[in-house]
Image (tube, rainbow, N blue to C red):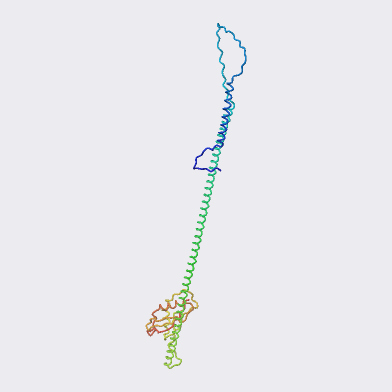
Amino acid sequence: MIRKNSEYPLQPPRERGTWRAFVFALVMHALLGFFLYHGIQWQNSTPEGAEAELWTEVPDSAIPRLPPPPVPVAPAPPLPDEQADIALQEKKRQQQEAARQAQLAEQLRQQKLQAQQEAEAKRQQQLAADQAAQKAAAAKQKQLQQQQQQQADKLKQQQLADQQKQQQQQQEQQKQADAEAQKKADAQKAAKAKAQADAAAQAKKLDAERRARLAQMQGSAGAPGSTGNGLAKSGTGSGSGGTATSPGYADKVRRVVRPNISWGGETEGLETVISVRCSPTGTLLDAQISHSSGNSAWDDAALRAVQRSNPMPQDIDGKTPTSFKITLRPAG
């Protein structure tokens, strides 16, 4: 392959054998001069004598005659050696020119081929560069997609973690709320149990006091088997126990307490006993459940009904008993 050199212009190829051609031409000219010299000498040499008999007629002077036309002189033919040398040199020149033209054509063909090869190489390089750029862009796009997928997965995991954490927090809050509610319920239950225990103790104490007063009253009356005014029978909205009451006092208590009962649940088997302490004027000083029905809702409704019945009615003597019990059942 002929490398293209842009620094030097295109020059015709250098002919070879110049000195050989020059020597050959000099020899040919010497031979030509030799043959020319001897040819001229040969033509100038005097030929040997020859005898000839000439007959001349006397022209008739009376008849004019035209002179004979001159004989044309044929040009001397060129020497064969000179023509051969000229033809040889012309042929050689033509061959050299043809060789030079062929060499120039070959150079042009080689240059064109080189230009085509360089263009093809450049095209291949550009194609390779384009393919590399496409591969790089595809790899970058793939990497970007992977990064986006990783970010999406990370975000999803973070969201799941946040949801789990939120659920755990909600569960913990629910547990705390349940624990607090249970604690509150336990506290209320304990307070209620304590209140019931205190009410039972108070009722027991009041019952003991009542029995002591009854025994004292019976002893002062002088009749061992005698009874006092008696106790009110228990019933819905009735009162019993505590200080002595008249036979109609239970009805008075029932008429006061019963309108204040608000209950819409079951009615069978429910009975609640409430211990009451009042001032002589009927002001309700204390009301506690001394015997539960087993249904806390009914117990609370019964206790609220008693508390709403403040003040309690007075007995026939114009005073309210200081302590007594009210047995409440829901109206069936």
Tell me which corner region of the image, top left, top right, bottom left or bottom right, holds residue 22. top right
Q: Residue 26: percent from the left, percent from the top? A: 56, 31
Q: Residue 218: percent from the left, percent from the top? A: 43, 91
Q: Residue furthest top?
A: 62
The residue closer to the viewer here, 59 or 315, is 59
In the picture shown, does residue 273 fall above or below 9?
below
In the picture shown, does residue 13 fall above or below 51?
below
Q: How many marks?
A: 0
Q: Residue 140: percent from the left, percent from the top? A: 51, 55
The residue closer to the viewer here, 263 or 83, is 83
Q: Residue 256: percent from the left, percent from the top? A: 41, 79
Q: Which corner quadrant holds the N terminus?
A: top right
The residue closer to the viewer here, 87 or 286, is 87
